[in-house]
Image (cartoon, rainbow, N blue to C red):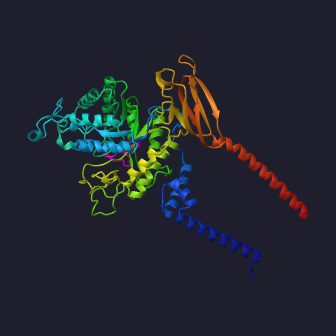
Amino acid sequence: MHTQPSHKRRWLAGGFAVFIVLAVLLALDLRSRGLVWNGLWSLTGEETPLAQLRGFVEYLGNFTRPQPNTAPDVPIQHVEMSPYGVNTFLQTEVEVSKRERQVQMIADAGFKWIRQQFPWEDIEIHGRGDFDDRRNVDAIGVVSAWDKYDNIVDLAEQYDLTIMARLDNPPSWTHANPDIGSSAPPDDVQDFVNYAVAVAERYKGRLSYYQIWNEPNIYPEWGNQPVNPEAYTELLCRTYTALKAVDPAIVVISGPLSPTVSLTPENLNDFIFLQRMYDAGAGNCFDVMSAQGYGFYSGPTDRRLRSTTLTYARHIYIRDIMVANGDAHKPIWISEAAWNAQPEDPAIVQIQYGNFGIVSEEQAARYMPLAYQRAQEEWPWVGVIFYWFFKHEDDSRQNQAWYYFRMVEPDFTPLPVYDSMKQYITSQRPVLYPGVHQVESWGLGLSQEAERVPDQSAQFGEAVRTDTVAFVAYGTDFILRYKPTDDGAWQQTFYSHSLITSKIDTQLGETGDNLVFDSITVIDRTYQNIAPLAGGAAVLIGMTLYVIITALRERRK
């Protein structure tokens, strides 16, 4: 009878014991949310151990296929402003005092933007060119349909909020066929163009950001008919040209595409829809690309990149398509971002139950600041992110899943996500992460005498004259693009800070210098700096081990 050598049995027993110990330690770590748990969370956005392990395997799939080209080191327009925005439905609040209370709470939380709908059906109500509201003649008589929106614009200015005006929702008179659906585009596109121009002319110099339509790639946003990228592109391009004629300073934002993997006539994959838009000439018809940023079934740290999976980072593929079509200089603004804290009770939520993923109130409050932070750290092409949404005027929609994205209850009771965002925004000191940052960026501190100056040789036709530039950067190096005088040549000065990524708090310039600054490029060269050192250390360690092993062998001889 042949028996295993005792030393081999001991080796196997020892190996099994080590495996058991490691397995127990891993289980304890995952249960107590320790080091391994946090590492897996940062890659998968999952919180339960089994989901984390499955997600990690899926994350490894990123390395088996080409990754999106995001061109993160090119100058980007329209990302210099504060990124904090929130969606509002101020037009549904009948009482002016309640509108003001909303705006005041939004400003108090540190938000600088609101995405506010200017519904066509609520402005040009009864017919072409008719801006009177006769829906309640017996109660209040004929009133101007503009009054409500004048008040909203006034309130935004009073509380230092910038409006991105969402233009959509046609009135019934624009459709000959009522069965086409209330959200369908008008029979005559020029009617929409005229409405957009009417809004822009009324608020010229007060509103500069206009979003054209909402989610044109899905039902029912394009009505009871197949979606049509080419038709949407025509509407977008004609409106773009008309708005620029009203005011060249107007910034046109494309309608956000709904994230979907569907390939049906009524719901078309956002990537296919966008490429067809580009093929139809849309690249010349918007200044800012728009996307949606819902987290669905994972947290904001999910780094699994699969085109068939819906995550908060899905816009990375949108960015890849933009770069491929020559739009690397344009930003993405995220029009709607949130996690759905709806009750897991079908008796309460009876419509669209579970379609958006379900998280707890605590998770929704924890995820949203992390979502903003990830965008600032990793995506220099992302500008404003609008939380979906602030509040409804009443609780009549509480049987619908989307009602539970709210930040504040109808009676103005703040939910945890409001408190967490307020704490995050009001306590934050802006940091410049890797990417190209225009000097007028919200993350830089300029002297009180700083002024914007037109300069066709600047990256985007405008620079800043100032004597000092103060900022906090997170990287290894940064490049300052400046010139000593208005008519001088641009210079680039390279500053090396550290071998590995770290923060630097600095101030450039001295009183009286009055230099002209264009941009600051923050760079992370950690890998390039460390790789040679690590390689040299590995060679040294290898040589040392070789010498030791060789000496031991000689000694045993």
Viewer-nearest residue: 397 or 94: 94
Residue under the point 32% across and 45% down? 218
Which of the 4 quarters of the picture holds residue 222? top left
Viewer-nearest residue: 516 or 459: 516
Asked whether residue 212 is in view, the answer is no
Quadrant where the image shows the C terminus: bottom right
Q: Is residue 242 left or right of residue 460?
A: left
Asked whether residue 52 is in view, the answer is yes
The count of marks equals: 0
Give the magenta part as a residue range: 257-272
User: From the viewer's perspective, is residue 173 above or below residue 512?
Assistant: below
Viewer-nearest residue: 314 or 79: 79
Q: Is residue 227 left or right of residue 549?
A: left
Q: Position of residue 474 (x, y in %)?
A: 57, 41
Q: Position of residue 402 (x, y in %)?
A: 31, 52
Q: Position of residue 84 (x, y in %)?
A: 41, 41
In this view, the residue farthest toward the left is 138
User: From the viewer's perspective, is residue 348 above or below residue 464?
Assistant: below
Look at the image and say whether residue 209 sits in the magenta stretch: no
Quadrant where the image shows the N terminus: bottom right
User: From the viewer's perspective, is residue 509 above or below residue 72?
Assistant: above
Viewer-nearest residue: 419 or 289: 419
Look at the image and say whether residue 258 sits in the magenta stretch: yes
Which of the 4 quarters of the picture holds residue 167? top left
Residue under the point 61% across and 43% down? 502
Q: Position of residue 40 (x, y in %)?
A: 54, 57
Q: Secondary structure of the magenta portion, mostly?
A: loop
